[in-house]
Image: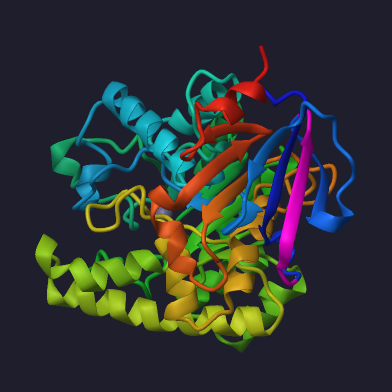
C-alpha cells in the first residue's frame, strides 16, 4: 500500500492514542513519509518543515484508525443462513465484497481481520487493497471456514445435492480437518476460522449449547495450522466448546459467550483475545420480528446477549483482551454499522469508553498480528488515524455517523472523510 510523502501535522485535537492512556487535550500528531514521528502534547511537538501540510483538529478527536476484528467482507443483506451460500455467484459476491471494503474504510476502519469469507475472496481483496486497486481496510484473510458435517454451517439437505464448497469445508474426523487446513494454507489465508459450536440462529439441532466439532478435530486443525504458521479461531458459544478450543491451542475465541471460571483461567493462561460481536445479538433481538425471526430464535439471541455481556465484563475485569467487531452484513445488522459495537460496549456493557477504544484499536491490531505497526498513535507506527468531530470519549456514538469523520488517514494519506480529495489529501499523496 502506498504511503504519503513529506510531513503532515494534525494539530490541536483531543488526542486518544489507543494505548489506554488518558487523552491529551491539546494533542498533535506529526506524520513523516506515512509514519508517525510524534504523538503527544502540541507544546512538545518537534519543529516541522515550513511546507508541511497542516490539519487543524480543534474541536475534534484524533485517534488511531479502527480495526474490525471479525469482518465478513462477503456477507451482504443476509436474512437466512441459506443466503450465505447460494444467494449470488462468486462473481457478484466479489463485487459486493469490494463495496463493503470501501464502506468500512469510509467508516473509519483502516484495518480488519476477516472472520471468514465466501470462496477465497478476502485473500484477493487483501491483494487488491495492498496494491491500491480498491480502497479498503488493511486485511487479514481467513478464506473459507471449517465445520464438521451436520454442524452449524452444513444446512443443505443431501437430497438437494448442493455442496457448501464456497463457504465451508464440511469435515468428518481428523484427516479431513488436516486436509481442509492444508487447502487453506495453499489459498494463502492467515487465520483459520472454525465452528466448534452452534448458534441461536439454528435452535433445532445446532443451538448455542451444541458442539459442532470434536476436540480431536479442533486439535488436528491447530496442529496443522500452527505447523504452517497460521492462527486458529472459532465460533464458540457453548461452555464446553470454549474449553475445547482453549485446550486445543486456539489463538483467539470468537464470541466466548458462556464462560465459566475454568474458561476464564484457560483464557488468561495464554492471554487469548476474544472478539465478542455482541451488537449482532442486540440487533437480532430488537429487529428480529421485523425480519420474521421466530420467538424461539430471538429468545436464544437474548440469552446469548446476556451471557456474552457478562463474560465480557469478567474478561476485562480479569485483565483479558477483547477485540471489537462482528457479523456485520446481515439485513438487520448491515455493513456500515460497525461502530455500533463500540456504543454497545459503553452503553449496554458498562465499559469505560477509553477501554473500548483500546479494544477497537490496539487489541484489534494485536489480533491481526500487526501490533508493532498498527493500532496506536506512537512514534514509528504507520499513520493510520482518524480526525472525528467532537469529543469521542465523552460521546462514543459520534463514531457511528460517517458525517462526523473529517479525516480517515491510511499510511499518511487521507483516503476518506470530509477532507479526502481536498488540498490536504493531494499534498500528502505520492506521485
Ligand atoms: Zn461471524
Q: In the drawing, does residue 393 fall left or right of residue 212?
A: right
Residue 188 showing in the rendered view: no
Observer-nearest of 429 and 70: 429
Front residue of 146/382: it is 382
Magenta residue span:
22-33
Quadrant of the rendering where the C terminus is positioned? top right
Q: Quadrant of residue 312?
A: bottom right
Q: Nearer the viewer, residue 57 or 239?
A: 57
Residue 30 colored in magenta in the image: yes
Secondary structure of the magenta portion, mostly?
strand
Residue at left offset 62%, top offset 36%: 410
Image coords of residue 67 (percent x, y): 57, 51
Q: Is 95 on the left or on the right of 14, as rendered?
A: left
Ligand 1 - quadrant of the structure image: bottom left
How far across and how far down the image is residue 393, in percent?
57, 70
Q: Position of residue 223 (x, y in %)?
A: 68, 49
Above or below 196: residue 410: above
The quadrant where residue 102 appears: top left
Colour mapping used in the image: rainbow
**Residue sitting at 37 percent across and 77 percent down?**
305
Q: Is residue 174 above or below residue 419?
A: below
Magenta includes 336? no
Amino acid at each position: 500500500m502506498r504511503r504519503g510523502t513529506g510531513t503532515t501535522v494534525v494539530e490541536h485535537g483531543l488526542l486518544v492514542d489507543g494505548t489506554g492512556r488518558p487523552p491529551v487535550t491539546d494533542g498533535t500528531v506529526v506524520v513523516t513519509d506515512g509514519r508517525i514521528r510524534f504523538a503527544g502534547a502540541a507544546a512538545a511537538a518537534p519543529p516541522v518543515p515550513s511546507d508541511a501540510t497542516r490539519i487543524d483538529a480543534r474541536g475534534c478527536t484524533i485517534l488511531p484508525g479502527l480495526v474490525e476484528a471479525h469482518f465478513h467482507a462477503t456477507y451482504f443483506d443476509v436474512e437466512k443462513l441459506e443466503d450465505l451460500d447460494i444467494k449470488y455467484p462468486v462473481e457478484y459476491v466479489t463485487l459486493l465484497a469490494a463495496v463493503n471494503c470501501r464502506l468500512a474504510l469510509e467508516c473509519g476502519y483502516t484495518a480488519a481481520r476477516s472472520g471468514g469469507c465466501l470462496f477465497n475472496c478476502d485473500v484477493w481483496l487483501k491483494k487488491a487493497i495492498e496494491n491500491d486497486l480498491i480502497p479498503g481496510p488493511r486485511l487479514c484473510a481467513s478464506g473459507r471456514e471449517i465445520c464438521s458435517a451436520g454442524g452449524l454451517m452444513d444446512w443443505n439437505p443431501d437430497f438437494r445435492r448442493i455442496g457448501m464448497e464456497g463457504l465451508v469445508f464440511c469435515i468428518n474426523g481428523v484427516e479431513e480437518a488436516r486436509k481442509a487446513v492444508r487447502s487453506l494454507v495453499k489459498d494463502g489465508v492467515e487465520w483459520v476460522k472454525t465452528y466448534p459450536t452452534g448458534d441461536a440462529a439454528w435452535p433445532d439441532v445446532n443451538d448455542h449449547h451444541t458442539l459442532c466439532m470434536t476436540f480431536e478435530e479442533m486439535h488436528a486443525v491447530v496442529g496443522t495450522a500452527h505447523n504452517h504458521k497460521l492462527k486458529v479461531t472459532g465460533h464458540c458459544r457453548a461452555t464446553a466448546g470454549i474449553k475445547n478450543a482453549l485446550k486445543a491451542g486456539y489463538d483467539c475465541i470468537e464470541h466466548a459467550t458462556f464462560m465459566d471460571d475454568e474458561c476464564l483461567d484457560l483464557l488468561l493462561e495464554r492471554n487469548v483475545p476474544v472478539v465478542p460481536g455482541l451488537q449482532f445479538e442486540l440487533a437480532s433481538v430488537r429487529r428480529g420480528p421485523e425480519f420474521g425471526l421466530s420467538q424461539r430464535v430471538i429468545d436464544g439471541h437474548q440469552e446469548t446477549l446476556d451471557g456474552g455481556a457478562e463474560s465480557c465484563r469478567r474478561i476485562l475485569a480479569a485483565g483479558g483482551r477483547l477485540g471489537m467487531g462482528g457479523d456485520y452484513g446481515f439485513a438487520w445488522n448491515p455493513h456500515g454499522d460497525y461502530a455500533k459495537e463500540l456504543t454497545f460496549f459503553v452503553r449496554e456493557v458498562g465499559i469505560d469508553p477509553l477501554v473500548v477504544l483500546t479494544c477497537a484499536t490496539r487489541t484489534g491490531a494485536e489480533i491481526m498480528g500487526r501490533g508493532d505497526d498498527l493500532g496506536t498513535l506512537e512514534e514509528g507506527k504507520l499513520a493510520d488515524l482518524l480526525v472525528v468531530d467532537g469529543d469521542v470519549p465523552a460521546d462514543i456514538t459520534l463514531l457511528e455517523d460517517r458525517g462526523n469523520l473529517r479525516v480517515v488517514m491510511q499510511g499518511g494519506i487521507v483516503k476518506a472523510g470530509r477532507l479526502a480529495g481536498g488540498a490536504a489529501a493531494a499534498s500528502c499523496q505520492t506521485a
